[in-house]
Amino acid sequence: MSTLYTSTVHVGKVAGVHRRATLPTGDTMEMGVHGAIARHYKLDAVSPLPLPVDYIVAATAG
């Protein structure tokens, strides 16, 4: 089996649960937690940001 694609996205920690992903194009995406997940982990003081899975769902849905 050969490799079809290798991702070159860089994900780095900004602070706490805040992450920044940098795409090969130079565009960035901010990721973190929000809603029920933030409440579950008692992170209500955190600025709400999309979860990484939010981006996956959006990309899959088109």
Image (cartoon, rainbow, N blue to C red):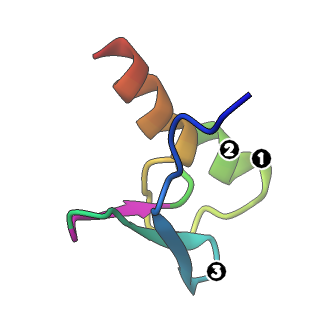
Q: Give the vertical position of 30 relative to 1 (above or below).
A: below
Q: Which of 51 and 56 is in front in this view?
A: 56
Point 42% across, 38% down: residue: 55
Labelled pair 2, 1 in contact (Cβ < 8 Å)? yes
In the image, what residue type sits under mark 1? His
Local crowd size for mark 2, using a 10 Å CA cut-off: few (<14), some (14–19), many (≥20):
few
The x and y percentages for residue 5 are: 50, 41
Distance (Cα) linking label 3 and label 2:
15 Å
Label 3's element?
loop
In the image, what residue type sits under mark 3? Gly
Using the rendered view, name the quadrant where residue 13 is placed: bottom right
The residue pinned by badge 2 equals 37
Residue 30 is marked as none
Q: Nearer the viewer, residue 60 or 36?
A: 60
Local crowd size for mark 1, using a 10 Å CA cut-off: few (<14), some (14–19), many (≥20):
few
Q: Give the vertical position of 53 relative to 61 (above or below).
A: below
Judged from this view, the residue extending furthest toward the right is 41
In the image, what residue type sits under mark 2? Ile
On screen, residue 37 versus residue 45, left or right, reads right
Q: Nearer the viewer, residue 43 or 58?
A: 58
Local crowd size for mark 3, using a 10 Å CA cut-off: few (<14), some (14–19), many (≥20):
few
> Which is more N-terminal, label 2 or label 3?
3
The residue pinned by badge 1 equals 40
The x and y percentages for residue 48 are: 44, 58
Residue 16 is marked as 3
Q: What stretch is highlighted in magenta?
A: 26-31
